[in-house]
Image (cartoon, helix red, strand yellow):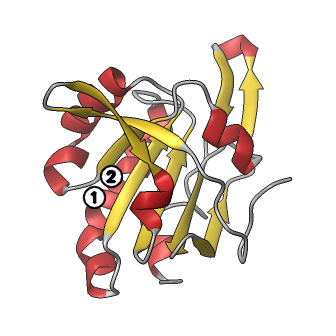
Amino acid sequence: MTVTTGDTLPDATLTAMGEGGPEPVSLADKVKGRKVVIFAVPGAFTGTCTEAHVPSFVRTKDGFAEKGVDEIICVSVNDPFVMQAWGEQTGATAAGITMLGDADASFTKAMGMDFSAPPVGLIDRSKRYAMIVEDGVVKAMGVEENPGVCEASAGEALLEQA
């Protein structure tokens, strides 16, 4: 089943880099009683993800804050070391965007958003999407049909729905 608007997010434990190394992050704790934006990408350091998707949320971060969004979270099927380096390289970390790894794709699969593209080395990766979540419930969502496109899931498109 693919999670969509009106659904409750599946529970998941993602991973972030903390001061002492990788740390588990309960998604349920992140969204409980809060308004958050979660956007997911096929892979850190890949073209559209680096050049379009992350920058769209860096550009719109203040706009989301004005609409009551407590936190913007980026999720990718990558380990926390990669997510930390990518967040630093793209300016996402400096902008205050939380970078979380879904290394085993368990959250991505529970969302029904997984795909594989073996010719380009992407196995069990996330479709490109973005959503507004209030207290664990998806209130708005944009999903791309093509992983190389960033339109419906871009920060600007989601901000219009906030």
Report the amino acid beneath label 1: Val
On the question of residue 126 being in view, the answer is: no
Which image quadrant for residue 62?
Answer: bottom left
Residue type pointed to by label 2: Pro
Residue positioned 48% across, 53% down in the render: 27
Mark 1 — residue?
58
How many numbered marks does the figure carry? Answer: 2
> Residue 34: x percent and y percent?
40, 75
User: Furthest-bottom residue in view?
Assistant: 67
Give the camera-side residue of 136 and 162. Answer: 136
Res 59 → quadrant:
bottom left
Looking at the image, residue 159 lies above or below residue 46: below
The one of 57 and 76 positioned closer to us in this rendering:
76
Relative to 58, residue 23 above or below: above
Quick one: label 1, few (<14), some, or many (20+) residues within 10 Å? some
* Mark 2 → mark 1, Cα distance in angstroms: 5 Å
Label 1 secondary element? helix
Helix, strand or loop for disc 2: helix
Question: Which residue is at a point 50% across and 58% down the rendered structure image?
Answer: 28
One can see residue 131 in this view: yes
Q: Position of residue 158 (x, y in %)?
A: 51, 73
Question: At x 44% / y 48%, what residue is drawn?
Answer: 26
Which circle marks residue 55 in the picture? 2
Label disc, if present, on residue 47 of the rendered structure: none
